[in-house]
């Protein structure tokens, strides 16, 4: 991959620099970026603002990564803007990557739609990411940082943290999700070095009688969190902290109330992440649910395993449907999530539009690796996803186990297409 800001800046200059006309919240980090952007988006929509949101990677198709008031832009608008940008890219011989083109499309759509605020998720890393083109974001957010994309960002957590901190801006406002101490110190040092006006270290929320609670300056704040997983306490607290910073410092957003925040959080959706999905259309029978999670790296898969351990009897087997992107450490992933009485159905996933470098690993390698970890484990590479679901659900009915699909968001997207679900 060829990173850097030269191509995206050259492309946007040909488009009269629409990014300079946007008010932006910029969100980087390793895990939780999508959830944090979704919470913020939902809160701002509830408060009456017109929002643009850009997430990556896309889910079902590239245009669903670009949303106006929470809804993907329509195909006609997407194609019209995309064609115009591709023509400029070609005529000027800029050589923009597919992600840079998509980022330019998002920026132009938000400018065309005159959104009140754009919530932009970093694609990969920070300093050299194509989204790092806004000179003065209203707030720069860094979610939890972990080990991922080491071949690009660096082999140590220190190097990764410094790269992620590259989205911070002089005289800007920054919000840091709860981090391990070493990472927190790096982020603080970077904020001080570039002279951020303010940086806030988020205090995590905690569960109280099924709801989340944050301690704020004016007292406890309780609210319902619809997304599953204890890690959402960090994500939602980060989003709320960013909204409060926005409300405090930018007069345009001073009217946001705690009621807007509560209701916005309550209405938040983030598909394919710790989500129970009814797969009965595949089975041709009555309601049957399966736990689905796009977790693909070690921190996210560890959180998935913790969720299962905390909510289900450990004696119950888990019947895993797993697809993994090529290049991942299969053995490390499986050692983390598998127990000896589990079963594995290894599958592939479809080609990903505009991401020709993404390929699934061979399902036989997944099945063989699972057997190598637990020699008596049932593990097979299935013919297709439908077959894997049918077999895994059958086993879960026989032994009162649970069926879980994970390993790649691209696999979750295939499930959505199979069930004809909307993102």
Image: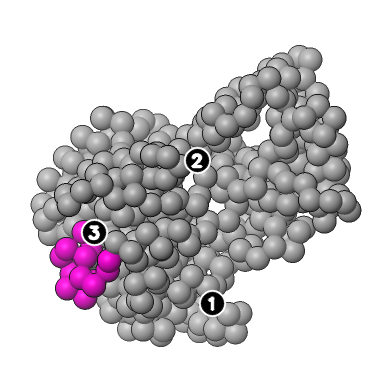
Q: Are dots 2 and 1 in contact, CB under 8 Å?
A: no
Residue farthest to the top?
375
At horizontal 36% and vertical 84% (from top left) the residue drawn is 114
Q: Main secondary structure of the magenta part?
A: helix
The quadrant where residue 36 appears = bottom left
Could you tell me which secondary element the residue under label 2 belongs to?
loop
Q: Name the residue under label 3.
A: 244
Q: Name the residue under label 2.
A: 229
Viewer-nearest of discs 3 and 1: 3
Q: What element carries label 1?
A: loop
Mark 3 surroundings: few (<14), some (14-19) or many (≥20) residues within 10 A:
some
**Mark pair 2, 3: CA separation:** 23 Å
Viewer can see residue 267:
yes
Mark closest to the chain's N terminus, 2 or 1:
1
Looking at the image, tell me whether mark 2 or mark 3 is earlier in sequence order: 2
In the picture provided, is 98 more to the left or to the right than 384?
left
Whether 416 is drawn above or below 211: the answer is below
Bounds of the magenta segment = 244-257
Closer to us: 27 or 95? 27
Give the alpha-carbon distance from disc 3 to disc 1, as whole Å: 28 Å
Task: Say whether marks 2 and 3 touch (CB < 8 Å).
Answer: no
Residue located at (71% from left, 55% from top): 414
- Residue 137, given in percent of the width and then of the height, sits at 25, 65
- The residue beneath circle 1 is 73
Residue 138 lies in what quarter of the image? bottom left
**Label 3's element?**
helix
Tell me: residue 59, above or below residue 303: below
Closer to the camera, 353 or 274?
274
Is 246 one of the magenta-colored residues?
yes
Residue at (54, 34) in percent of width and height: 307
Q: Where is residue 175 in the image (x, y as percent from the top left)?
A: 25, 51
């Amino acid at each position: 991959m060829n990173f850097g800001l030269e191509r995206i800046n050259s492309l946007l200059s040909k488009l009269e620099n629409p990014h300079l006309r946007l008010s932006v919240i910029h969100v980087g980090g390793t895990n939780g970026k999508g959830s944090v952007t979704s919470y913020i988006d939902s809160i701002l929509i509830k408060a009456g603002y017109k929002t643009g949101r850009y997430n990556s990677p896309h889910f079902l198709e590239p245009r669903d990564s670009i949303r106006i008031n929470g809804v993907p832009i329509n195909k006609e608008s997407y194609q019209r803007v995309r064609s115009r940008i591709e023509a400029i890219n070609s005529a000027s011989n800029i050589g923009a990557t597919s992600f840079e083109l998509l980022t330019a499309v998002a920026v132009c759509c938000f400018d065309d739609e005159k959104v009140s605020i754009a919530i932009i998720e970093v694609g990969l890393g920070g300093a050299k990411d194509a989204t790092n083109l806004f000179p003065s974001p209203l707030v720069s957010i860094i979610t939890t940082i972990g080990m991922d994309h080491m071949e690009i960002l660096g082999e140590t957590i220190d190097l990764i943290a410094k790269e992620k901190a590259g989205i911070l801006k002089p005289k800007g406002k920054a919000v840091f999700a709860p981090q391990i101490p070493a990472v927190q110190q790096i982020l603080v040092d970077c904020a001080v070095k570039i002279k951020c006006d303010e940086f806030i270290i988020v205090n995590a929320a905690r569960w109280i009688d099924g709801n989340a609670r944050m301690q704020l300056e004016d007292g406890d704040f309780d609210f319902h969190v619809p997304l599953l997983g204890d890690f959402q306490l960090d994500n939602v607290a980060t989003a709320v902290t960013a909204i409060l910073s926005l409300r405090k410092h930018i007069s345009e957003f001073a009217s946001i109330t705690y009621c807007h925040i509560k209701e916005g959080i309550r209405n938040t959706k983030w598909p394919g992440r710790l989500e129970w999905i009814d797969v009965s259309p595949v089975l041709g029978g009555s309601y049957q649910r399966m736990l689905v999670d796009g977790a693909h790296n070690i921190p996210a898969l560890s959180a998935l395993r913790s969720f299962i351990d905390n909510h289900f009897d450990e004696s119950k087997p888990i019947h895993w449907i797993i697809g993994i992107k090529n290049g991942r450490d299969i053995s490390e992933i499986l050692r983390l999530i598998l127990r000896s009485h589990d079963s594995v159905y290894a599958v592939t996933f479809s080609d990903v539009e505009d991401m020709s470098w993404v390929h699934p690993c061979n399902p036989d390698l997944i099945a063989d690796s699972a057997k190598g970890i637990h020699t008596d484990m049932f593990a097979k590479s299935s013919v297709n996803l439908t077959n894997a679901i049918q077999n895994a659900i059958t086993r879960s009915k026989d032994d009162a186990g649970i069926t879980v699909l994970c390993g790649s968001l691209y696999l979750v997207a295939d499930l959505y297409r199979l069930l004809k679900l909307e993102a």
